[in-house]
Image (spheres, grey):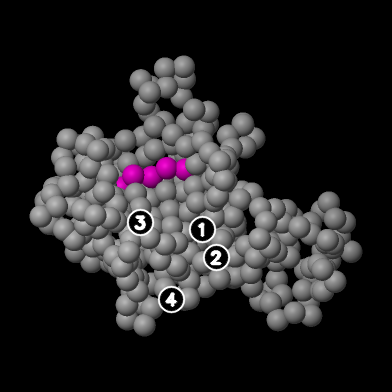
């Protein structure tokens, strides 16, 4: 039998998750989400296959997931507000609760007709953000649905569009950079008016004659771990790993229907990283479509760039 110290860390991580978490997969909006605000401006349609958010001068709207997740691969297809969307923001993000929250952001900043959307991204850990990167897209995100993905595992966060990575934020706790890893997060999305800052720094205001503004969602998929304990930490009464069998809470994984051997494929995201082809696509996006990077903003950080900026060029 292998000693405890010789077991690869990823197996221990999976074992810990199995004790407190369960896998979640594709579902529908009735089952997976709650409409949280908007007074009728958010609607679930087509037997739960489609969700729409609307914004008018009185209010926007929003929803969040019923489940909380601690690591996962989250996909959502979104069709953004068309036409003159200046002043509007469609936000799609993961966020935990509390004053020291974690958060992983996509925000889509509207623009005048014919001008490109800006994709605003950020990563918060323990309540600290200020890690903005912004991009244009290489297509019209209002003409059809496109897939926006968040890969979040213990080693890295990768934000992707239609399978093309646009940003990677690595776990650099070894040099003192906080990384989201201990707080379960819900999926949130909202459509709201932010014409005080969203378009050209607030110079272009929302044209309410174009209201209502509508964003649409479909094909949600979460290959992820759902937090079920109701607390912010994993509690493990007993752990023993031997020959790929996990003993926890008085039950052996070898006697369950979901042994490590049968779930290893679906859990591949737990250790996923970018291969050379993905790195090339990331470099292509950042060379041609990145319009702001906090890691190059020396005026903003006169005392020196954040440590992750000098440690890696993919933060």
> Label 2 belongs to which residue?
67
> Label 4 belongs to which residue?
30
Q: Between 290 and 66, which is closer to the camera in this rendering?
A: 66
Q: For the residues labelled 1 and 2, say whether their Cβ atoms are less than 8 Å apart.
A: yes
Q: Identify the mark at residue 186; answer none if there is no mark.
A: 1
Image quadrant assignment for residue 18: bottom right
First in sequence: mark 4 or mark 3? 4
Q: CA distance from mark 1 to mark 2?
A: 6 Å
Q: Position of residue 119 (x, y in %)?
A: 31, 47
Secondary structure of the residue carrying tag 2 is loop
Q: Is residue 85 visible?
A: yes
Q: For the residues labelled 2 and 3, say whether their Cβ atoms are less than 8 Å apart.
A: no
Q: CA distance from mark 4 to mark 3?
A: 17 Å
Instruction: Please tell me how crowded label 1 is: few (under 14), some (14-19), or many (20+) other residues with Cα within 10 Å.
Output: many
> Label 3 belongs to which residue?
190
Q: Which residues are magenta?
A: 119-123
Secondary structure of the residue carrying tag 3 is strand
Secondary structure of the residue carrying tag 1 is strand
Question: At x 66% / y 60%, what residue is drawn?
Answer: 230
Q: CA distance from mark 4 to mark 2?
A: 13 Å
Q: Between 114 and 86, which is closer to the camera in this rendering?
A: 86
First in sequence: mark 4 or mark 2? 4
- Residue 53 included in the magenta stretch of the image: no
Q: Between 150 and 129, which is closer to the camera in this rendering?
A: 129
């Amino acid at each position: 039998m292998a000693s405890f110290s010789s077991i690869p860390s990823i197996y221990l991580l999976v074992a810990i998750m199995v004790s407190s978490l369960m896998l979640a997969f594709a579902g529908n909006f009735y089952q997976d989400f709650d409409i949280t605000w908007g007074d009728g401006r958010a609607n679930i349609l087509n037997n739960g296959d489609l969700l729409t958010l609307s914004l008018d001068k009185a209010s926007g709207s929003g929803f969040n997931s019923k489940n909380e997740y601690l690591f996962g691969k989250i996909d959502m297809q979104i069709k953004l507000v068309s036409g003159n969307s200046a002043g509007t923001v469609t936000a799609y993000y993961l966020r935990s609760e509390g004053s020291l929250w974690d958060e992983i952001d996509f925000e889509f900043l509207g623009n005048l007709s014919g001008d490109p959307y800006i994709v605003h991204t950020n990563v918060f850990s323990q309540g600290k953000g200020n890690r903005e990167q912004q991009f244009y897209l290489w297509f019209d995100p209002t003409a059809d649905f496109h897939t926006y993905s968040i890969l979040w595992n213990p080693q890295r966060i990768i934000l992707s569009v239609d399978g093309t990575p646009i940003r990677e934020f690595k776990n650099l706790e070894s040099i003192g950079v906080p990384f989201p890893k201990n707080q379960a997060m819900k999926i949130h999305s909202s459509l709201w008016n932010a014409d005080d800052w969203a378009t050209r720094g607030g110079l272009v205001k929302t044209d309410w004659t174009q209201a209502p503004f509508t964003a649409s969602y479909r094909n949600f998929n979460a290959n992820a771990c759902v937090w079920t304990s109701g607390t912010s930490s994993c509690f493990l009464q007993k752990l023993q790993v031997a020959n790929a069998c996990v003993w926890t809470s008085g039950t052996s994984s070898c006697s369950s229907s979901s042994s490590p051997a049968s779930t290893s494929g679906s859990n591949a995201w737990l250790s996923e990283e970018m291969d050379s082809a993905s790195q090339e696509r990331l470099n292509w996006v950042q060379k041609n479509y990145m319009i702001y990077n906090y890691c190059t903003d020396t005026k903003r950080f006169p005392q020196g760039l954040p440590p992750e900026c000098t440690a890696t060029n993919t933060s």
